Amino acid sequence: MIPPQVALRAEADGVHLGGDDASPAAARALLGDFAIVGVTLNEPAHLARFAGVRVDYAGVGPFRHTASKQKLAAIHTPESLAALIAAAAPLPCFSIGGVNAADWPELRSLGAHGVAVSGAIAMASDPVSAAKSLVEAVSA
């Protein structure tokens, strides 16, 4: 994850904050009202971290084990993921953690607004085809 200070210097449109990163309030204060501020949401207790602060989306999960992250929170069941998404409403939630194109119908039924992926593309034998499959799945 990129610290808010780096996002500011790079003139990035925003920043995604994991649980060990700067607070959403600090990022919003540094980057301003027009920046995109996203957060990782692994459990209901994390909601308190951004209470009263405008965040633009949450990466919610993990859905399953992923090789792209070493320090992984507990894997969610479909029921716990749906409950977490519902608890975060109306915040848009994007499912994270081991997600691939075939998962989208289930994740959508659980309330996810979209998916955030890295390994599904970066570790694919054909990254272009994997990316196209993901776009097609979430666009259907």
Image (cartoon, rainbow, N blue to C red):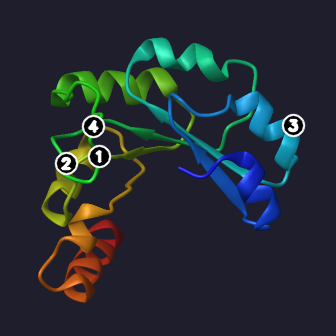
Looking at numbered disc 3 in the image, what kind of residue is underneath it? Ala
Q: Measure the alpha-carbon separation of dots 1 and 4.
A: 10 Å
Q: Is residue 136 above or below residue 13?
A: below
In the rendering, which numbered label is found on residue 62? 4
Where residue 111 appears, as percent x and y from the top left, is 35, 39
Q: Which residue is mark 3?
A: 29
Looking at numbered disc 2 in the image, what kind of residue is underneath it? Thr
Q: Which quadrant is the C terminus positioned in? A: bottom left
**N-term-proximal mark, 3 vs 2:** 3
In this orientation, which residue lies closer to the viewer: 136 or 5?
5
**N-term-proximal mark, 1 vs 4:** 4
Q: Which residue is mark 2?
A: 66
Looking at numbered disc 1 in the image, what kind of residue is underneath it? Lys
Q: Measure the alpha-carbon separation of dots 3 and 2.
A: 32 Å
Q: Mark 1, mark 4: which one is toward the viewer?
A: 1
The reply to whether callout 1 and callout 4 are in contact (CB within 8 Å) is yes
Q: Which residue is mark 1?
A: 69
Secondary structure beneath dot 2 equals: loop
Q: Is residue 49 above or below residue 14?
A: above
Q: Is residue 27 left or right of residue 90?
A: right
